[in-house]
Amino acid sequence: FLWDSAPEGQITLLEGHTGPVMSIDYSNDGRYVVTASWDKTARIWDATTGAHLRTLQGHEGMLNQALFSPDSTRVLTVSNDSTARIWSVDTGAQVALIEGHDGPVRGAHWSSDGSRLATLAEDTIARIWDAETYDLISAIHSNADPRRELIRFGKDAHILFVHAKENGTVAWSVQTGEPLIDLAMFNPITPHF
């Protein structure tokens, strides 16, 4: 379902996937929605009408996430087939196949300037890729359960934050793959009674 926060509520029902939908993302230009499903596809929808526009097909495993690039021209998908793929929003064609993980890829993130992307897999390694050439820039050995991790780039794409439920948040250098600071020791949410 697409919902409006106004009292009218539901805008439309997005129908077409044959398996559970694992993620949904809006394009920054507000024109599209992308969904990722365990049916091994991602689908691009018109954000206003809910009309199905394209099916992104090619993964051999269930999809865990789909994200638009900051300029809304590409979609990044990650899958249990140990790959990430880049797709054209305009045509639905696969632009790139990104390989290198030794296990299902669970999450991903684009840098805000669109120059880099990060993937995180069950091999406990976050990999940072050049978003134009798709070359590997660095690998971060987080050694935490990726099913409980979240990755996000810092504002300037030089830092990657990896949050693991059991280990807290660590800021890593994108260039070197080395930890910069463990933010768990600066937990501002500690209650004071």
Image (spheres, grey):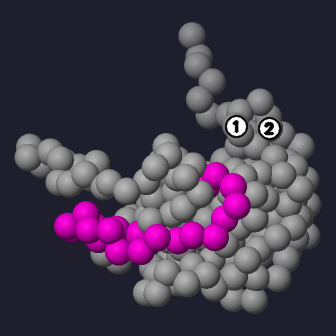
Residue 9 lies in what quarter of the image? top left
Q: Of all residues shown, which one is farthest toward the top?
A: 193
Q: Gap between marks 1 and 2, in whole Å? A: 6 Å
Q: What residue sits 52% from the left and 71% below the top? A: 56
Instruction: Answer whether residue 160 is magenta in the image.
Output: no
Left or right of 30? Residue 75 is right
Q: Amino acid at mark 1?
A: Arg
- Span highlighted in magenta in the image: 44-63
Q: Is residue 111 above or below residue 162?
A: below
* Residue visible at 49% across and 43% down in the picture: 20
Q: Position of residue 116 (x, y in %)?
A: 69, 77
Q: Are marks 1 and 2 in contact (CB under 8 Å)?
A: yes
Q: Nearer the viewer, residue 153 or 82?
A: 82
What is the secondary structure assignment of the residue under circle 2?
A: loop
Going by the image, does 193 lie left or right of 105?
Answer: left
Pointer 1 residue: 148
Location of residue 53 in the rendering, given as x and y in whole percent from the top left corner: 35, 74
Q: Return the residue at label 2.
A: 145
Q: Secondary structure at mark 1?
A: helix
Residue at 89% across, 56% down: 102
Q: Position of residue 179 (x, y in %)?
A: 88, 55
The quarter holding residue 100 reads: bottom right
How many residues crowd mark 2 within 10 Å: few (<14), some (14–19), many (20+)?
some
